[in-house]
Image (tube, rainbow, N blue to C red):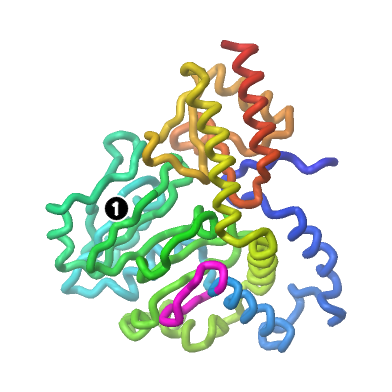
């Protein structure tokens, strides 16, 4: 069977060459007579993978020397709790910008730990845009432990184009757009990302944090929950998700071989423009959920005229091997997730299918 056009929101498409390499090395990794899944995380073979993966992240993202890279488990959802557990002291507040379901969940967890408050929100408009931080709002941040945002919102299809730049520690959940575009790491104090969108399969969470934060970690919580514990042990305090880290290394190498983040961003811009042009030029047959200046280049969310037409679109799309186009169950509609590994060809074919579908049913 030929591979489908995979527009799943996550776990999402992986580069076919990466899957092929993993297949070839699955039973016998580099003549060790073992699969990487069977190998000790203390072995020299795995140690090389582990450290090479960190080096690739440093290189591709241009991460400065004063940042630490961690490989953790539990996904971004675990970071929702660990961040306030480590950094939210009793005399400070954590401020959250609300742009969708994931920021809601992050705030909910933080409220269990300490004073966590909603700073800005676009919920009243069904999260169709990224809210603007006004000068009068900035004054509220004087007692901030950190300001938290979600850089890309998979469910609603919005994305930050410019990040706030204030004298407040900036924490960002970048699970769904890390490695998709160039960013200035120096703008952020703490970045975290589940791998299953642009970095690899589910199982590993990448944390990029200023080393100065490590000494600020709360020492009264269990050691396994302290970032300092994992930083001191090079993310080997307990058994890491070795196979997921190995797959992450292959994906990063694929990005490097294909021109790095700059080239990846160029292709991602082409894919997003093609789909949004298809939607905007449909005379209302398709309607984008997100406002133009907040549109995500990773998750293109849209609706059709009614539920019957939407269901018919999804049914015929699946018959044509376009998989994963259902919108999230919380808002419905349609969603095309066009992460790094989704080819321009797949997006071109989806665009053509959308044109043909419109001609038949408008």
Q: Nearer the viewer, residue 272 or 204?
A: 272
Residue 271, placed above or below residue 209? above
Residue at left 34%, top 35%? 126
Where residue 174 sits: x, y (%)? 45, 58
What's the magenta region? 59-70
Label 1 residue SS: strand
Where residue 154 sits: x, y (%)? 48, 45
Residue at left 42%, top 32%? 289
Where residue 18 sits: x, y (%)? 74, 60
Residue 36, placed above or below residue 197? below
Residue assigned mark 1: 97
Can residue 144 be seen here?
Answer: yes
The answer to whether residue 175 is magenta is no
Identify the image quadrant of the N terminus: top right
Q: Nearer the viewer, residue 129 or 100?
A: 129
The quadrant holding residue 202 is bottom right
Residue at left 71%, top 87%? 43
Residue at left 64%, top 78%? 52
Left or right of residue 206, residue 190 in this image:
left
Left or right of residue 17, residue 110 in this image:
left
The quadrant holding residue 255 is bottom right
Where residue 266 sits: x, y (%)? 56, 49
Identify the image quadrant of the C terminus: top right
Neighbours of disc 1 within 10 Å: few (<14), some (14-19), many (20+): many
The quadrant holding residue 170 is bottom left
The answer to whether residue 63 is magenta is yes
Mark count: 1
Can residue 247 be seen here?
Answer: no
Residue 316, placed above or below residue 329? above
């Amino acid at each position: 069977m030929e591979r489908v056009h995979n527009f799943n929101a996550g776990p999402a498409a992986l580069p076919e060459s990466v899957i092929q390499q993993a297949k070839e090395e699955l039973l016998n990794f580099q003549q060790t007579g073992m699969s990487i899944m069977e190998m000790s995380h203390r072995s020299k073979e795995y140690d090389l993978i582990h450290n090479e993966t960190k080096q690739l992240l440093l290189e591709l993202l241009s991460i400065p020397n004063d940042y630490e890279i961690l490989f953790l488990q539990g996904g971004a959802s675990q970071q929702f709790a660990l961040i306030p557990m480590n950094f939210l002291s009793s005399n400070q507040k954590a401020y959250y910008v609300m742009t969708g379901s994931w920021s809601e969940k992050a705030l909910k967890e933080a409220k269990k730990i300490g004073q966590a408050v909603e700073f800005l929100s676009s919920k009243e408009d069904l999260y169709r845009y990224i809210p603007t931080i006004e000068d009068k709002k900035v004054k509220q941040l004087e007692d901030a432990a950190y300001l938290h945002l979600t850089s890309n919102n998979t469910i609603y299809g919005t994305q930050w184009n410019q990040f706030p730049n204030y004298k407040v520690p900036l924490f960002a959940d970048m699970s769904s757009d890390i490695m998709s575009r160039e960013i200035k790491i120096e703008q952020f104090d703490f970045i975290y990302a589940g791998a299953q969108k642009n970095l690899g399969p589910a199982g590993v969470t990448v944390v990029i944090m200023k080393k100065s934060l490590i000494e600020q970690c709360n020492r009264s919580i269990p050691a396994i929950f302290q970032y300092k514990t994992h930083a001191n042990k090079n993310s080997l305090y307990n058994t890491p998700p070795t196979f997921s880290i190995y797959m992450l290394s292959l994906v990063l190498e694929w990005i490097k071989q294909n021109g790095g983040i700059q080239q990846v961003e160029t292709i991602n811009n082409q894919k997003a423009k093609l789909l949004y042009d298809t939607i905007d030029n449909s005379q209302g047959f398709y309607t984008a959920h997100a406002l133009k200046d907040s549109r995500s280049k990773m998750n293109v969310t849209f609706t059709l005229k009614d539920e019957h037409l939407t269901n018919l679109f999804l049914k015929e799309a699946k018959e044509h091997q376009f998989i994963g186009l259902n919108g999230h169950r919380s808002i419905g509609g349609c969603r095309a997730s066009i992460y790094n590994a989704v080819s321009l060809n797949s997006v071109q074919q989806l665009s053509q299918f959308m044109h043909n579908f419109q001609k038949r049913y408008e």
